[in-house]
Image (spheres, helix red, strand yellow):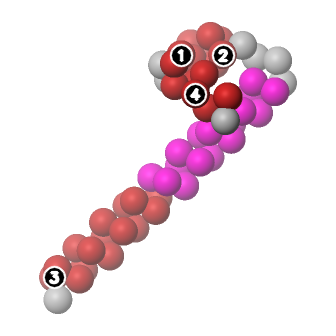
Amino acid sequence: MSGYVNYLREDRERTMLKMRNEGENNIIRTLFKNKMSAKEIAEKTGIALNEILKIVKT
């Protein structure tokens, strides 16, 4: 039983992380579309510039 509970807990954590990442990516894309530079987004969010560039190119 505890194995199943751990599985559910880990699945929930993966789902929450995925949702957070998707939301973060959408915010970054919106900022970029609204003329904020990738460098400025990186500075304001603390996310590496190369990660910002990957997000806005997709």
- Determine whether label 2 and label 1 are within 8 Å by CB: yes
- Residue 4, position as x, y percentages in the image: 23, 83
Sequence order check, earlier mark of 2 and 1:
2
User: Which numbered disc, 4 or 3, marks the residue that appears first in the sequence?
Assistant: 3
Residue type for callout 4: Lys
Report x, y in % for residue 28: 67, 31
Compare marks 4 and 2 and give the one earlier in the sequence. Answer: 2
User: In screen coordinates, is 6 left or right of 18?
Assistant: left
Pointer 4 residue: 54
Q: Secondary structure at mark 4?
A: helix
Circle 4 or circle 1, nearest the eye: 4
Q: Residue at x 15, y 82 (%)?
A: 2
Q: Is residue 14 above or below residue 42?
A: below
**Tag 1: Cα neighbours inside 10 Å, few (<14), some, or many (≥20)?**
some
Q: Secondary structure at mark 2?
A: helix
State the separation of the CA atoms marked 2 and 1. Answer: 7 Å
Rendered image: mark on residue 21: none
Q: Which residues are magenta?
A: 17-33
- Local crowd at mark 3 within 10 Å, few (<14), some, or many (≥20)? few
Residue 31, above or below 41: below
Mark whose residue sits in front, 3 or 2: 2
Height in image: 33 above or below 3? above
| x 76%, y 17%: residue | 36
Give the amino acid type for the residue marked by disc 3 in the picture.
Ser
- The numbered mark at residue 2 is 3
Residue annotated with mark 2: 38
Q: Quadrant of the N terminus?
A: bottom left
Q: CA distance from mark 4 to mark 1?
A: 9 Å
Estimate the spatial distance between the alpha carbons at disc 4 and disc 3, rounded to whole Å.
Answer: 39 Å
Kindly indicate whether the residue at mark 1 contacts the one at mark 4 (C-beta within 8 angstroms): no
Give the residue at x 52% y 25%: 51
